Image: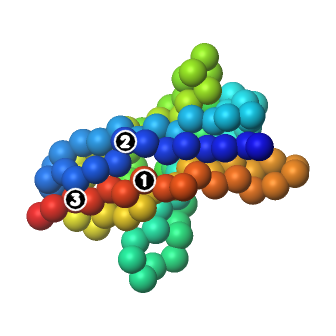
């Protein structure tokens, strides 16, 4: 079945960087739109960044200039480069793909930013 596997989370200090990866299995990320969402404790899941099949990227305001989404078609992987991290970026980050068949989510990767 379709799987999205995230990795790259961890504990980092304020101002640090992390790169998250989302690798697809049985789904070609190069022909879909892939999103990164995040969910902090007690909060709703929120969209962070998106990359379309054509490579167009979009970001929510609170990460613009700090986060970069990209894709490696050969590796079937979407990345989220996160720089200048802040404590409010602490959350579980999820990869998401929506097709005509279903919504697919990864298991999430924890990002913790210490102050």
Question: In the orientation shown, which residue stands out farthest toward the bottom?
Answer: 42
The number of callouts visible is 3
When the figure is inspected, residue 86 is found, relative to residue 25, above or below; the finding is: below
Is the residue 44 above or below the residue 95 in the image? below
Q: Which mark is residue 113?
A: 3
Split into 4 quadrants, where in the image is the N terminus?
top right
Residue 73, image x, y percentages:
62, 21
Nearer-the-camera pick, 109 or 97: 109
Residue depicted at x 70% and y 53%: 104
State the residue at coordinates (63%, 55%).
105
Q: What is the secondary structure assignment of the residue under circle 2?
A: loop
Can residue 60 be seen in this snapshot? no
Packing grade of label 2 (10 A; few <14, some 14-19, many >=20) is some
Of callouts 3 and 2, the N-terminal one = 2
Against 10, residue 71 (above or below) is: above
**Which residue carries the number 1 mark?**
109
Q: Are marks 2 and 1 in contact (CB under 8 Å)?
A: yes
State the residue position of label 2.
Answer: 8
């Amino acid at each position: 079945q379709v799987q999205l596997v995230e990795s790259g989370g961890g504990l980092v200090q304020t101002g640090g960087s992390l790169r998250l990866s989302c690798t697809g299995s049985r789904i070609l990320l190069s022909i879909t739109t892939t999103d990164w969402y995040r969910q902090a404790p007690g909060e709703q899941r929120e969209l962070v960044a998106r990359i379309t099949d054509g490579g167009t990227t979009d970001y929510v305001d609170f990460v613009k200039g700090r986060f970069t989404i990209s894709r490696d078609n050969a590796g079937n992987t979407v990345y989220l480069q996160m720089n200048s991290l802040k404590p409010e970026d602490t959350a579980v980050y999820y990869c998401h793909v929506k097709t005509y068949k279903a919504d697919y989510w990864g298991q999430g990767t924890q990002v913790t930013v210490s102050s």
